[in-house]
Amino acid sequence: MTSLGRVISVRGSLARVGLLSTSKMTIPEIRATVGRFVSIRCPNSIIVAMITDVSCEQVPSSADYIATAGVDLLGEILGGERPKFQRGVTHYPTIGDPVDLINNQELRTVYAPSGSDQINVGTLQQDPSVIAYVDVEEMLSKHFAVLGSTGVGKSTGVSLLLNEILKSRPNLRIFLLDVHNEYGRCFGERAQVLNPRNLRLPFWLFNFEEIVDVLFGGRPGVPDELDILAEVIPLAKGVYTQYQHSDRIGLKRADPRAVGYTVDTPVPYRLVDLISLIDERMGKLENRSSRIIYHKLISRIETVRNDPRYAFMFDNANVGGDTMAEVISYLFRLPAQGRPMTIMQLAGFPAEVVDSVVSVLCRMAFDFGLWSDGVSPLLFVCEEAHRYASADRSIGFGPTRKAVSRIAKEGRKYGVYLGLVTQRPAELDATIISQCNTLFTMRLANDRDQALLRSAVSDAAANLLSFVPSLGTREVLAFGEGVALPTRLRFKEVPPHQLPRSEAAIKTMPSVAAGHDLHFVAAVLERWRGATSQRDVPNDPSLGDRQTVRPSEPRPVEAPMLQPSMGLDPDRFSLLKKPLR
């Protein structure tokens, strides 16, 4: 059979191929288009290359060529009884070597799984009969990222990857930051779902920068108040230690300063002791203006302490108890007990503390890996990563960026792996994304995002990135250590029960019948106010963890003014039985 073309020039990892007009190939075979693989026949090997451009300009007149194509040399198939593919080229082609479109058998050799630690993520775009495998060890140990604009199937791709990883590595623990509460149902019984209602993250686990961020609502702290806090927090930890060991002779009278705790030492202390120490210092002051600073600080602490939205931090704040072991076991599934994955739903947290909560979780994940010598590996997946590790140092919360960066740079040494998911890679800290050695890139239209990818991809097939704006839904360009070659593939179908779906979504329903609209709104307002007031509002199990109004979930009620489709309990909203004025 006549070859598709012949090599007409070679330069480093690039070559130019002349496409022959005398080819006897059929029409489907002869489509030597951008992105397709070709094979260059050499005496000792078959070089695998990818077409990056096709042109009919500057066609050599001395030969029967109709066009030329630029190709990137990616690797080679070495002969023998069992052909094997390896990256890189040891024997370069020479002028005149024949070039053909790669056949099915050669593609299977290139993408053949090299071991049992491979996961099936989809099929090749060039040949759907060839399965695209990803090396789990390479992908995890050197971090990975999933990039793509909204609506291209990014969340579905993340669900697919994590489900396949769970199958391949049942003992690996996974921690997923779920920004939009859309992954709760994707992993079934293998995942524990956490939210503000069932999370207990004691305030004393927060380091100084993180607790300041909480107390000041994400705004910069007042310097005078920060000085007071920095002085009294270590003392409050010392007081608690004395309290715990008061039965031991001599410790009861010991000076709290002698305990040696710093402001960031992760040991318990009680808010009542903290406020008492501040109040004690305030009582020694004679200057009234100086006392105002102490008053404001006490008021600030008590306001946050009494805010029901912060109950996950300040529940039992004055009872004490060193529960750090229980918290870490609960968060990071030690032991897993059949649920190796934790999904942290962040949408229900107060916006002012989301950054500090993420900072605490990242920091604890890394520190536990560090001090346990990595004996229990953990994959930390960060959805919407650009929100927590922004390239712009003037926005976001510095400690969160630092915690994510620390996992990216050093986590692999201690069994803490990082998975980043973002729709705006250009807004993500370049140092962090550069540590991800496997990239799954879906459609990206923004020029800045594409420029960042070009700088991050070191493979010879960086020209593949020119395809990024035209990728279809579920189509992916996979680069890096986890895949055999830079590959254009299509993620496989995900079962319906594994599809991400926001729990906040409310199905379209017929409008509420006239005459009941006002009562429905009043019931919603009652629940709304109850979520941010100190009086208890009973939980309604039919409404789920987030207590979101869901007209699509019917519940029988007796109140004549409420329709069953509203899903509301009249006992909780007795005020509606009275006429509204």
Image (cartoon, helix red, strand yellow):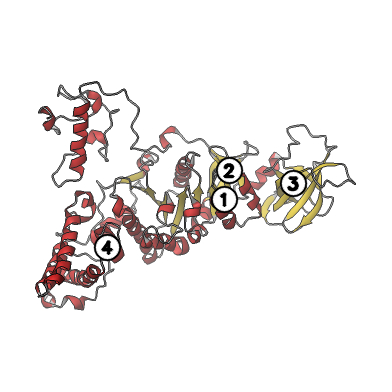
Badge 2 is on which residue? 469
How would you rate the neighbour count of disc 3 (Cα within 10 Å): few for under 14, some for 14-19, many for 20 or more? Answer: many
Q: Could you tell me if residue 401 is visible in this image?
A: yes
Badge 3 is on which residue? 39
Q: Residue at (56%, 43%) from the top-left corner?
A: 476
Q: Could you tell me if residue 172 is visible in this image?
A: no
How would you rate the neighbour count of disc 1 (Cα within 10 Å): few for under 14, some for 14-19, many for 20 or more? Answer: many
Q: x%, y% of residue 93?
A: 79, 54
Asked whether the beta carbons under mark 3 and mark 4 sit within 8 Å of each other, the answer is: no
Asked whether the beta carbons under mark 2 and mark 1 sit within 8 Å of each other, the answer is: yes
Disc marking residue 212: 4
Between marks 3 and 1 in the image, the one whose residue lies nearer the viewer: 1
Disc 3 is placed on an element classified as strand
Disc nearer the start of the sequence (2/1): 1
Disc marking residue 450: 1
Q: x%, y% of residue 543?
A: 25, 35
Compute the Cα span from label 4 to label 2: 43 Å
- Which amino acid type is shown beneath numbered disc 1? Gln
**Residue 37 to residue 427: above or below:** above
Disc 4 is placed on an element classified as helix
Q: x%, y% of residue 13?
A: 72, 56
**Total label count?**
4
